[in-house]
């Protein structure tokens, strides 16, 4: 997974400049937005240049070794900036901060603040403490370290986020109780916590009032949602679908074990729920799934997919995969490839297994040699890519409702999102940004689709050439390699 883009969500004018670099998942993107929001009243306004910043926050990811190492190399570069600008504050947030807070303080003493994901609401207080310490060197304080799991959820203390365009994230759940043997999340993010439904609905209404047409519900284990006032994620989605102006709902990331019947049913009867689901399976081998403590078999996964497709025929799936998990033999890897071809995932993330300190799998034997992990990853990615390209090719000739989100790369071009999260380009007036329009897909580029304006209900073409459109919107099964 690529690092998320650096974000600068709060538009509040201020005298001081804040640069946030976000690594890892969408949850971190959301959290970076919240940190910017809590710092805005202190006069911090976003900048996209670290050398221009009075404060730099690295919002980090600990999921794989590479992601964690990158933080230390980025800190090395920041040290040089801080040497030139002594007043600059450096904070390390996120999962590396949670897992390696003391080590960061020791290895990078020029870091002013280290804060775990549960304490973002205390950031202003930490900034004030750092400033006091700087003004009073006699106090001898080196830096602030706060990696507690406070009893009170941070959401109660964070300002409601504002919409920053037609799409928005909304964090509804955090933490994980599943303890997959390879994963650090239960240790860095803590136990599962679900926000009360009333708070989520209030935040969603605010986002829609601010211009969001599509909301992605976020959680490390989002479909384990069990917040007060809702009977699970299906029931929460039905309540959200009542909000006028909320045209699209998505949720990520889900666990197969929590894909209950009510949630599956919601895919059939809530039209706002998009027909695209990220449902990580990790491996197609029952032996490996058991060793990973996933709590489901490959047949369980198949049954869930069948039920989802019964509920909504045009459902497409994406997944995460790990290659070279301890004990993975060629036969296990073949099982994964077979499952990929059977399900026809349309988009996926795949990783080499990375042993994480403190997780059970890191101590398992035999560990798979790196060259084997790499070779399997390449094979797996080739097949995933074929599925992605076939899926995109099959979209040509179909008409999709596309949410136009902004300007494209070329003058006069807009970019939007299909129901399947594909980027769609079309020549159109910028006044359409923020609206959902039917577009006829006419071409496929490497990882995006080209479109023209589709016929309206009177059979007219409002822009571009007429193109044949396929009857209905049902997805043809993805052709396998
Ligand atoms: N090594 C490799 N990949 C991992 N993931 C989580 N932990 C590890 C690890 N130790 C992957 C899983 C998960 C995704 C977010 O990251 O596939 O679904
Ligand atoms: Fe990690 Fe997801 Fe497993 Fe939780 S369910 S331990 S977040 S991989």
Image (spheres, rainbow, N blue to C red):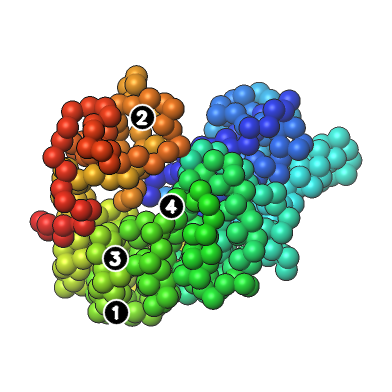
User: How many angstroms separate mark 1 from mark 3 (CA)?
Assistant: 18 Å
- Crowdedness near tag 4: few (<14), some (14–19) or many (≥20) residues, C-alpha within 10 Å: many
Q: Secondary structure at mark 1?
A: helix
- Crowdedness near tag 3: few (<14), some (14–19) or many (≥20) residues, C-alpha within 10 Å: some
Which one is in front, 169 or 270?
270
Q: Position of residue 396 (x, y in %)?
A: 17, 42
Judge from the rendering whether residue 76 lies leftward or rightward of residue 86; answer left or right. Answer: left
Q: Secondary structure at mark 4?
A: strand
Q: Earlier in the sequence, mark 2 or mark 1?
A: 1
Which of discs 1 and 4 lies nearer the camera? The answer is 4
Residue at 38% over, 67% down: 269
Which of discs 2 and 1 lies nearer the camera? The answer is 2
User: How many angstroms separate mark 2 from mark 1 (CA)?
Assistant: 41 Å
Q: Position of residue 219 (x, y in %)?
A: 51, 61
- Crowdedness near tag 2: few (<14), some (14–19) or many (≥20) residues, C-alpha within 10 Å: many
User: How many angstroms separate mark 3 from mark 2 (CA)?
Assistant: 29 Å
Q: Secondary structure at mark 3?
A: loop
Give residue 326's quadrant in the image: bottom left
Badge 1 residue CB within 8 Å of ligand 2: no
Judge from the rendering whether residue 236 lies leftward or rightward of residue 150; answer left or right. Answer: left
Judge from the rendering whether residue 420 lies leftward or rightward of residue 394; answer left or right. Answer: right
The numbered mark at residue 300 is: 1
Residue at 56% over, 47% down: 208
Q: Earlier in the sequence, mark 4 or mark 2?
A: 4
Which residue, given by chain and number where applicable, does mark 3 sit on? Answer: 312
Which residue, given by chain and number where applicable, does mark 2 sit on? Answer: 414
Which residue, given by chain and number where applicable, does mark 4 sit on? Answer: 248
Farthest residue in the top direction? Answer: 411
Label 1–label 4 contact, CB within 8 A: no
């Amino acid at each position: 997974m690529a690092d998320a883009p650096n974000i600068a969500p709060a538009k509040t004018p201020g005298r001081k400049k804040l640069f946030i670099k976000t690594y890892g998942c969408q949850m971190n993107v959301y959290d970076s937005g919240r940190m910017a929001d809590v710092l805005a009243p202190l006069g911090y306004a976003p900048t996209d240049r670290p050398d221009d910043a009075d404060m730099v926050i690295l919002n980090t990811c600990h999921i794989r070794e590479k992601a964690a190492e990158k933080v230390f190399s980025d800190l090395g570069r920041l040290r040089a900036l801080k040497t030139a600008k002594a007043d600059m504050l450096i904070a390390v947030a996120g999962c590396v901060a949670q897992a390696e807070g003391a080590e960061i303080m020791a290895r990078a003493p020029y870091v002013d603040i280290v804060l775990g994901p549960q304490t973002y609401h205390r950031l202003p207080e930490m900034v004030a403490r750092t400033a006091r310490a700087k003004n009073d060197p006699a106090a001898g304080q080196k830096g602030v370290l706060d990696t507690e799991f406070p009893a009170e959820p941070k959401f109660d203390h964070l300002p409601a986020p504002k919409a920053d365009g037609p799409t928005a994230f909304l964090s509804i759940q955090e933490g994980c109780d599943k303890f997959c043997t390879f994963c650090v999340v239960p240790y860095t993010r803590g136990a599962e916590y679900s926000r009360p439904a009333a708070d989520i609905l209030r935040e969603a209404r605010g986002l829609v009032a601010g211009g969001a047409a599509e909301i992605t519900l976020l959680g490390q284990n989002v479909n384990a949602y069990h917040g007060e006032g809702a009977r699970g994620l299906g029931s929460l989605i039905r309540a959200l679908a009542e909000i006028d102006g909320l045209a699209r709902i998505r949720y990520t990331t889900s666990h197969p074990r929590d894909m209950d019947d009510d949630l599956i049913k919601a895919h059939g009867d809530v039209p706002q729920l998009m027909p695209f689901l990220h449902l990580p399976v990790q491996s197609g081998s029952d032996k490996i799934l058991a060793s990973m403590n996933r709590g489901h078999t490959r047949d369980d996964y198949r049954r869930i997919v069948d039920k989802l497709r019964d509920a909504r025929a045009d459902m497409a799936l994406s997944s995460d995969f790990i290659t070279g998990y301890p004990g993975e033999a060629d036969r296990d890897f073949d099982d994964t490839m077979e499952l990929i071809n059977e399900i026809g995932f349309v988009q996926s993330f795949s990783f080499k297994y990375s042993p994480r300190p403190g997780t059970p799998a890191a101590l398992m034997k035999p560990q798979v040699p790196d060259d084997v992990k790499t070779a399997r990853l390449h094979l797996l990615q080739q097949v995933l890519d074929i599925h992605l390209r076939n899926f995109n090719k099959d979209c040509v000739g179909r008409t999709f409702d596309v949410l136009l989100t902004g300007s494209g790369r070329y003058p006069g071009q807009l970019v939007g999102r299909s129901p399947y999260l594909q980027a769609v380009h079309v020549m159109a007036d910028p006044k359409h940004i923020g609206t959902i329009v039917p577009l006829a897909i006419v071409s496929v580029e490497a990882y995006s689709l080209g479109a023209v304006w589709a016929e309206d209900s009177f059979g007219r073409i409002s822009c571009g050439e007429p193109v044949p459109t396929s009857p209905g919107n049902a997805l043809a099964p993805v052709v396998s390699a």
